[in-house]
Amino acid sequence: MYKIFPNVVILALIFNFAPSQAVMAQKFGHYDSEFVLGKMPEYAEKQKEIEALAGTYDKEVRSLYDEVEKMRAELRATEVLLTAEMKKDKEKEILEKQNEALKRNTELFGYNGLYFKKIDELLLPIRNKVNKAVEVIAKKYGLDYLFDKAADVGIAYSNPVHDYTEFVLEELGIKEN
């Protein structure tokens, strides 16, 4: 009897404290952030602003690189007339101009460049608004996870029954046509 008692106690504890399958079930859903953002007029507005800014920055950088190419062409055209020291000075000027262009390109389009900072400044409030709506929907429908189909999560297939995109749009006050 004393040998069986510890086993019975252990089994009772296991079955008593082991979570049942019903308790462990999790609810999943998905939504499409690109679709939601595409339906938001303020997002389209900000996208146009970002594209215009990118065009301006691109022109600025391109003009610097064009100057470098023009300087190289001038050097090639006059190379035979220059002394070795004059040629070396011209090459130094070209290298400095090229470094200036590279530096400006990095300032504008680099990892922490002005372009990406402006994207964050303009789009982050909109994305936060969508994220808050997603959170409200997830809580409202008791979802444990609400995946974004537009993100690189690797969803190969999703049942439309679990699509909460329309609810997110509704939460944002966007009417679907």
Image (tube, rainbow, N blue to C red):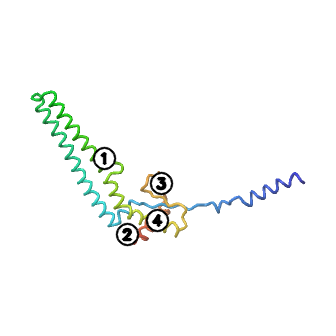
Which residue does the numbered mark 2 point to in the structure image?
176
Q: Which of the image's four quarters has the N terminus?
A: bottom right
Q: Quadrant of residue 90?
A: top left
* Circle 2 residues within 10 Å: few <14, some 14–19, many ≥20: few
Q: Residue at x 45, y 66 (%)?
A: 132
Discs 3/1, front: 1
Residue position marked by numbered label 4 in the rendering = 134
Residue visible at 13% across and 30% down in the picture: 79
Label 4: how many Cα within 10 Å (few below 14, some 14–19, many 20+): many
Residue ID at (21%, 35%): 92
Label 3 close to label 4 by CB (< 8 Å): no
Task: Residue at the far left: name it.
Answer: 81
Q: Where residue 29 sits: x, y (%)? A: 50, 61
What is the three-letter code of the residue carrying label 3?
Answer: Tyr
Sort mark 1 into few (<14), some (14-19) or many (20+) by Cα contacts within 10 Å.
some
Task: Give the residue type that dot 2 points to.
Answer: Glu
Please name the residue that numbered disc 3 is placed on: 157
Q: CA distance from mark 3 to mark 1?
A: 39 Å
Q: Quadrant of the C terminus?
A: bottom left
Which callout, 2 or 1, points at the residue further toward the start of the chain?
Answer: 1
Q: CA distance from mark 4 to mark 2?
A: 17 Å
* Of the image marks 3 and 1, the number of the one nearer the N terminus: 1
Q: Nearer the viewer, mark 1 or mark 4?
A: 1
Up-down relation of residue 76 to residue 68 (above or below): above
The spot of residue 74 in percent (x, y) is 13, 36
Q: Quadrant of residue 20?
A: bottom right
Q: What kind of element bears circle 1?
A: helix
Left or right: residue 99 versus residue 80 is right
Task: Give me the C-alpha separation between circle 1 and circle 4.
Answer: 35 Å
Which comes before the other along the chain, label 3 or label 4? 4
Q: Give the label on residue 106, or none.
A: 1
